Image: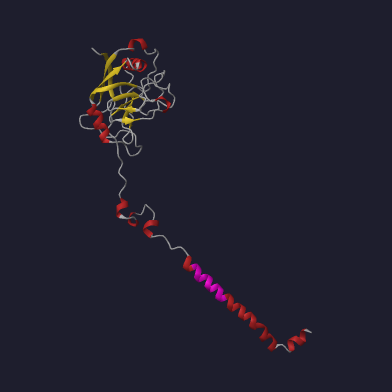
Amino acid sequence: MPPVEAASGRSVAVRDWKPVVGVLAVLAIVIGFVVAANQLTKPKPLDPVASASATDSTALPTASSAPTPTVTPSLLAGCTPVPAGPTAPKRMTTKPDLEGARGRTFIATLTTNCGPVTVELDGAKAPATVSSFLLLAKESYWAGTTCHRLTIEGIWVLQCGDPTGTGSGPGPGYHFGIENAPADGIYPRGTIAMARTSDPDSNTDQFFIVYKDTTLPTQGGGYTIFGKVTGGMEIIDKIAAAGVLPSDGMTPLAPIGFVSVSVQPKA
């Protein structure tokens, strides 16, 4: 049988290849359409300026070629550098004299690197807090301490008192509870109050000065008001006006801290 097919087969062979050629032509057309479609839907390359390496200054827009300026703390006119404090916070070996402060009024002088701030301390409304303040002032606990936190939106306070200058120091070795916290959560300008954690018994060494009327949460007991500024608020105002470091949104851009803190009974 194979020789018969071969002998009679030239015309047969031609007829058999026609369908094959037709199929190949259809496949070629389909492949052509696929290639064309891929070229049309293929993502375009990124703009050379946007995709170029940042090390190639010629490939970057002029506005982006300048480095972002770094903002650093800067002393205000009339201020001196904050003196260096102790290498480690002092730990008190004695407890505050609660009875020595109870019912009495004191005048504290916070001598800052920008001038003195005077504060009247209320031992009648906050005896535990005032007795602690008296002890820490007597022991020069805050000498060389930098105020570490300034808030400029929503609440308006300057927070100080941590010898480490970070707000996360270990404290003086004791703690006490909340006193004289306003039920309405309103802290008028000039108020001096205690900072604490969520624990109501975590008052220790950190305090804040309110430079603009502020409302704080009352949940958890609020914050102890133990005095008011009677002089030097203009110093706090100019520190607040200078703003904060953009890098953390917290550190005062104009450094302020304590050269010394002294307390005397009010005459």
Residue 249: image x %, image y %? 34, 37
- The residue lying toward the viewer, choosing from 183 and 20, is 183
Q: Is residue 99 left or right of residue 120?
A: right
Percent position of residue 17, x then y: 65, 82
For this orientation, the residue located farthest to the right is 1
Quarter of the image for residue 219 reads top left
Please state the extent of the stretch shown in magenta in the rendering.
Answer: 28-38
Q: Indicate whether 118 appears above or below 47.
A: above
Position of residue 239 measured from the top left corner of the image (x, y, whole percent): 26, 32
Is 149 situated left or right of 19 in this image? left
Residue 198 lies in the magenta-colored region: no
Q: In the rendered image, which quarter contains the N terminus?
A: bottom right
User: How was this image coloured?
Assistant: secondary structure
* Position above or below: 42 against 149: below
Counting every numbered tag in the picture gives: 0
Image quarter for residue 142?
top left
- The vertical placement of 195 against 68, above or below, is above
Residue 32 visible in the displayed image: yes
Q: Residue at x 24, y 31 (%)?
A: 237
Check if residue 37 falls in the magenta segment. yes
Q: What kind of secondary structure does the magenta stretch mostly adopt?
A: helix
Q: Going 29% across and 30% down the picture, which residue do you hit? A: 213
Quarter of the figure with residue 119: top left
Task: Give the residue furthest to the front.
Answer: 184
* Quadrant where the image shows the C terminus: top left
For the point 60% across and 77% down, the residue is 24
Looking at the image, which is closer to me, 141 or 104? Answer: 104
Regarding residue 97, the answer to whether it shows in the image is: no
Vertical arrangement, residue 146 with respect to residue 129, above or below: below
Name, please, the residue furthest toward the left. 78
Between 253 and 156, the residue placed more toward the observer is 156
